[in-house]
Image (cartoon, rainbow, N blue to C red):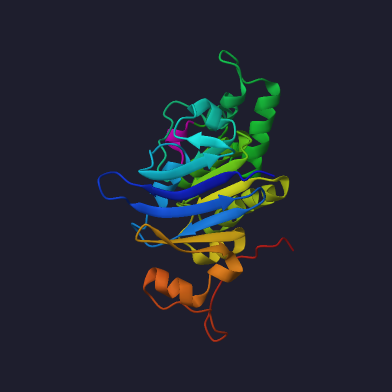
Amino acid sequence: MAPLLELDSLSAGYGPTPVLSGVSLRVEPGQAWVVLGPNGAGKSTLVRAVMGLLTPASGTVRVCGLALPGTPAHELARVAAWVPQVMDDATGFTGLEVALMGRAPHLSAWGLPGPRDEARAREVMQELGVEHLAARPLAEVSGGERRRVWLARALVQSPKLLVLDEPTAFLDIRHQVETLRAVRRRLSDGLGVLAVLHDVNLAMHVATHALLLKDGKCVASGPVAEVLTAGALSALFDIEMHPAAEAEQVFVPRWEAP
């Protein structure tokens, strides 16, 4: 099958000096790539370029074969969905209305969501534990609840590629795990994922592959077992990293259902 995302020598930024330089990546169906790196490494810049929100200084971006920039937003929305790092509160819209917005790319110009669309939206909201927000304006809910509603919207969109910028921000431990489980379950259906995370341990559990960014450059990429090593992570974050020893008290959530 064709790759869902191809980056070839991508350089991008917001001025004369690129934030990203020469980054290449290929996301295949069923792969979940996590992007790790220190603050200012270019992670969010990478996401914006992938979603066509930033014109590359050089290199190419293709999403499901569509060249960016140059592809109309509504065409891109049929194959790719994203949850940004910073979300507005969708003032005046309820949780269900926001989730239903995910169906918009698949409707005709004047089409309205039908009963099947609403049923799908409610199903995904229930999966993410936000069905109780169906009639609540998003301006009245917490940041974590809002983030899960926006993820519901992205999943209702039925994308081939899902792009997530810090999807676990504002979420407690339980909802971090349940949110990433919902994403991981869809890999077997061929979904491809590109997610920016800060928690290395979450990355180990949810991702199949990792891209390490530092100073706008890729310093390592590949399967998580090969890339997420103590040496690589120590060099990436400029702090010694090591596997937790038995003598250390470490609490981790159970990832597999009992």
Which percent across, then down, holds residue 105? 57, 26
Residue extent of the magenta highlight: 137-142
191 left or right, relative to 59: right
Specify the farthest residue to the top. Answer: 110
Specify the farthest residue to the right. Answer: 258
- Quarter of the picture holding the C terminus: bottom right
Rendered residue at 68%/36% (across/down)? 123
- Quarter of the picture holding the N terminus: top right
Say above or below: 198 vs 102. below
Rendered residue at 46%/71% (across/down)? 233
80 left or right, relative to 117: left
Can you see residue 142?
no
Can you see residue 219?
yes
Rendered residue at 54%/38% (across/down)? 81
Query: Per the image, is 140 magenta?
Result: yes
Residue placed most toward the observer, 89 or 195: 195
Specify the farthest residue to the left. Answer: 16
Rendered residue at 49%/28% (across/down)? 73
Say above or below: 56 vs 203. above
Which percent across, then down, holds residue 35? 48, 57
Say above or below: 213 vs 73. below
38 left or right, relative to 95: left
Which percent across, then down, holds residue 121? 64, 32
